[in-house]
């Protein structure tokens, strides 16, 4: 998912209209904050796929540590 908040908001609105409960995403690092906010706002869980080209598991662990706790 991109860092474009408007585009991502439309996606979450569509997912809510379709009554989806989960989305699998490959996000940009800079989008994580607003994606987390949108997920909470629309009550949709995110499954973050970590396999972006050129990114190792250690980097993803660093960027996602502490997110989604208690979900």
Image (cartoon, rainbow, N blue to C red):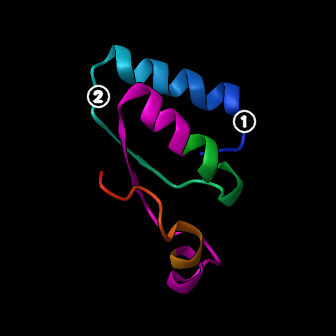
Question: Mark on residue 20?
Answer: 2
Residue drawn at (54%, 38%) of the image: 37
| Rendered residue at 59%/45% (across/down) | 1
Please say whether residue 40 is one of the residues in the magenta stretch.
Answer: yes
Judged from the image, the secondary structure of the residue bearing numbered disc 2 is: loop
The residue at 47%/19% (across/down) is 13
Check disc 1 and report the residue beneath it: 4
Residue 10, position as x, y percentages in the image: 56, 21
Query: How many labels were placed on the picture?
Result: 2
Nearer-the-camera pick, 10 or 67: 67
Classify residue 55 by image quadrant. Answer: bottom right
Task: Give x and y (percent) for residue 8.
Answer: 59, 32
Q: Which residues are magenta?
A: 36-60
Extreme front residue here?
Answer: 70
Q: Is residue 43 left or right of residue 2?
A: left
Structural crowding at the residue carrying mark 1, measured as other residues with C-alpha within 10 Å and reported as few (<14), some (14–19) or many (≥20) = few
Height in image: 36 above or below 49? above
Residue 48 lies, with reference to residue 20, above or below; the image says: below
Residue pictured at 60% horizontal, 52% vertical = 32
Cα gap from disc 1 to disc 2, whole angstroms:
21 Å
Q: Quadrant of residue 43?
A: top left
């Amino acid at each position: 998912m991109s860092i474009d908040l408007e585009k991502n908001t439309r996606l979450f609105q569509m997912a809510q209209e379709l009554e989806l409960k989960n989305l699998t995403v490959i996000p940009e690092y800079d989008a994580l904050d607003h994606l987390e906010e949108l997920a909470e706002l629309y009550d949709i869980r995110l499954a973050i796929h970590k396999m972006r080209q050129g990114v190792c598991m250690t980097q993803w662990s660093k960027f996602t540590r502490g997110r989604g706790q208690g979900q």
